[in-house]
Amino acid sequence: MNPYEQYGLYIAGPQCFYPRGYSQWHGHRKLAEFYGFTVVLPNDHSLKLDHDDPRKNADAIFADLREVIERTDIIIADLEHFRGTEPDGGTLFEMGMTWARGGLLYGYTRDKRPVGAKNPFIHFDADHRIRGRNELGHPYADMPFVPSIVASTMVAEGDFHDGLKMLMADLDERKKRNHRDPQTDVPEAAFPRTRKRDKKTVFLSGPARYHDDGAAIYKRMKAVCGTYGYEAVSPLDGAEDLFRGTEDPVIRACMLFDHWQEQLRSCDIFLGDLNDYNGLEPCGDTAFEAGVAWKLGKECYGYMDSASRMLDRIPNRGGHDVAGNVVENFEYPLNLMFSCSMPILSGSFEHIPELIKAGIPQKR
């Protein structure tokens, strides 16, 4: 009897960018198959990637991923930091997609210490408040990852094999729990209830949630959205009373995550700030929420100060960054997960709602 063959396991991570990364990826796959999992990956299929326009090659990869996610019950992700202090944004997008369809999330990292212990940019300001890069606040410095990952994902400390062993142990325990109470492991039960709104609403996803002046920033953003007939919701709305009675960072992450999920699911439009955050990747919460929003069928838009192509934005030599990792060359500004799933608009936020109101085709 094979207890795990019923599960479609997706192995996520930035290995496709690493020197010799595909060898590592194939090794992970063989190990998972040894234990009996049915592994599903986008590169299982032969794709036509000879378009003159490299963006069409990226679109073909993403279209294949859409089908693969439909067969994914579990994702196990490499959560090592990538081009900064956040995990690979594309990996977090895939995790968000899997979460949105009720899948189970697992990850692994060599270092589960809090971000404050491993982020070289973290420091105290003159008032002894914790700061990250560009002097932004860093309220999750006592967590190993952004709240969206802490709250949604079971994370092992170690390598892929450690994560896989943790996954198998948890699946065995879930069987016991389900045998005693079949309602305890219904994926839909983990989704917060949503509420209906009167106007078309925008969820403002981005790292401003961690800014000292976040409330004022979101107030201005809401005013801009209101000019074009939208109601806007920010991650800070209603969050000030969440933590009364607890200092536990895991419970705090869960409260934030559930709150943000409720807001996102009750909105019509996802609008994500995809500018670099703590390195050369977008905010991890925004990357995860982008995957959730796209999978839930929301209207999705991203924006950046400059949406120039990655080869022009990320320092590289011959298409490889300082660590030797491949810099994507699909003529897109970001990882293809974002670029192939939503329009990425260029410019300051003040102009973005106007562009959306004017009508921009969705990528579906």
Image (cartoon, grey):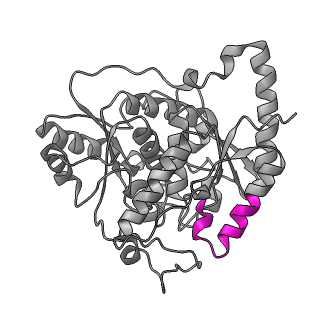
Q: Quadrant of the C terminus?
A: top left
Name the one closer to the observer, 137 or 49: 49
Relative vertical location of residue 223 with respect to residue 114 in this rendering, above or below: above
In the picture provided, is 170 more to the left or to the right than 220?
right
Residue 352 visible in this rendered orientation of the protein = yes
In the picture provided, is 53 more to the left or to the right than 95?
left
Relative vertical location of residue 241 with respect to residue 306 in this rendering, above or below: above
In the picture provided, is 300 more to the left or to the right than 145?
left
Residue 138 visible in this rendered orientation of the protein = no
Relative vertical location of residue 175 with respect to residue 109 in this rendering, above or below: above
Splitting the image into 4 quarters, where does residue 17 fall?
Answer: bottom right
Q: Residue at x 36, y 65 (%)?
A: 55
Q: Position of residue 319 (x, y in %)?
A: 48, 81
Give the prevailing secondary structure in the magenta stretch.
Answer: helix
Q: Quadrant of the N terminus?
A: top right
Name the one closer to the observer, 147 or 323: 323
Q: Residue at x 71, y 69 (%)?
A: 23
Q: Position of residue 78 (x, y in %)?
A: 65, 56
Residue lying at the far bottom of the rendered structure = 318
Q: Is residue 18 magenta?
A: yes
Name the one closer to the observer, 285 or 360: 360
Count every numbered label the image shows and give the total. 0
Relative vertical location of residue 60 with respect to residue 227 in this rendering, above or below: below
Q: Position of residue 160 (x, y in %)?
A: 75, 55
| Highlighted range, magenta | 13-28
Q: Residue at x 50, y 30 (%)?
A: 258
Q: Is residue 16 magenta?
A: yes
Q: Position of residue 251 (x, y in %)?
A: 61, 32
